[in-house]
């Protein structure tokens, strides 16, 4: 593979990033997160209740759901109905919820549950990482609204949160894979990390052949560089 990809990017470059806040006028924590052609609507809605296991503990809860609208992939993606779970969607929503809980002081939101819904409107690779990046911004806005109306006294977020896909395609290490690159990758991986550089998840593996520790370190290096850029884009979007 040449030093440039089909979309003109260098291997370590990200797709154009945009976070459109307050995308739903009635929902303070609503963000349209865009990484290139991938678009995910992330909403954070607060309810004055907690799961049974947290009642009378003085703590709140953060949970997530993830799904794809039928037209998100160009061909119709079947809706989940009834009790038929979509294994991939369940895996991703557990990841999103777990990642968000790692950066929230739940004692600062006692008796409240924050539902973070991530709905994929258009999928061109990296939907789970786009969901995590947008969910952080949506959660930040939801907590800001609670703080401003006096519903909470302490700021709940302890860190920022970023995620990115990395991979090896035709022996080239690259970041923020689109669908074509992801589907042809020899190795693909997702990195989830806090703003201070602490890891939440490294999830990936070889698709066609094994890879070396040297290649793993190269993936982590390009991923860390990408995460810094994503954090800057989030911070810029969150400016008043």
Image: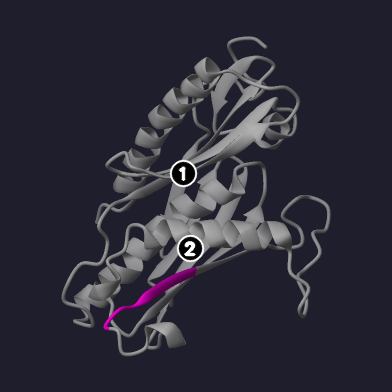
Which of the labelled discs sits on residue 163, or is there none? 1
Q: Which residues are magenta?
A: 58-63
Q: Of tags 2 and 1, which is closer to the observer?
A: 2
Question: On the rendered structure, is 111 left or right of 169?
Answer: left
Residue beneath the point at 25% across and 67% down: 156
Q: Identify the colour scheme used.
A: one colour
* Depth order, front residue of 240/203: 203
192 on left or right of 41? left
| 2 and 1 marks in contact (CB < 8 Å) | no
Q: Residues within 10 Å of mark 2 (few under 14, many from 20)?
A: many
Taking the spot 67% from the left edge, 48% from the top edge, the residue there is 123
Q: Quadrant of the C terminus?
A: bottom left
Residue 25 seen from this side: no
Q: Single out the residue that lies furthest toward the top.
A: 2
Location of residue 149 with respect to 143 vertically, above or below: below
Which secondary structure, mark 1?
Answer: strand
- Percent from the top left, x then y, of residue 48? 37, 88
Q: Nearer the viewer, residue 159 or 148?
A: 159
Q: Earlier in the sequence, mark 2 or mark 1?
A: 2
Image quadrant in which the N terminus is located: top right
Residue 59 in magenta?
yes
Tell which of 25 and 86 is nearer to you: 86
Q: Which residue is mark 2?
A: 97
101 sits left or right of 147 in the view: right
Q: Secondary structure at mark 2?
A: helix
């Amino acid at each position: 593979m040449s030093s440039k990809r089909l979309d003109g990017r260098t291997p370590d470059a990200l797709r154009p990033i945009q976070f459109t806040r307050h995308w739903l006028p009635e929902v303070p924590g609503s963000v349209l997160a865009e990484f290139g052609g991938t678009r995910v609507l992330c909403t954070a809605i607060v309810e004055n209740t907690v799961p049974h296991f947290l009642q009378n503990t003085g703590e709140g809860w953060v949970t997530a759901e993830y799904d794809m609208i039928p037209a998100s992939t160009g061909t119709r993606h079947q809706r989940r109905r009834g009790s038929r779970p979509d294994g991939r969607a369940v895996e991703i929503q557990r990841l999103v919820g777990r990642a968000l809980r790692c950066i929230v002081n739940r004692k600062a939101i006692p008796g409240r549950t924050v539902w973070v819904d991530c709905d994929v409107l258009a999928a061109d690779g990296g939907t789970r990482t786009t969901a995590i990046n947008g969910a952080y911004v949506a959660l930040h806005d939801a907590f800001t609204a609670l703080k401003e109306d006096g519903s909470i006294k302490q700021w709940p977020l302890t860190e920022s949160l970023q995620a990115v896909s990395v991979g090896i395609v035709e022996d080239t290490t690259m970041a923020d894979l689109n669908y074509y690159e992801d589907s042809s990758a020899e190795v693909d991986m997702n990195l989830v990390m806090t703003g201070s550089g602490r890891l939440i998840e490294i999830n990936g593996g070889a698709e066609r052949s094994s890879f070396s520790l040297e290649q793993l370190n190269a993936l982590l290096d390009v991923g860390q560089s990408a995460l810094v850029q994503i954090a800057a884009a989030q911070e810029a979007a969150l400016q008043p």
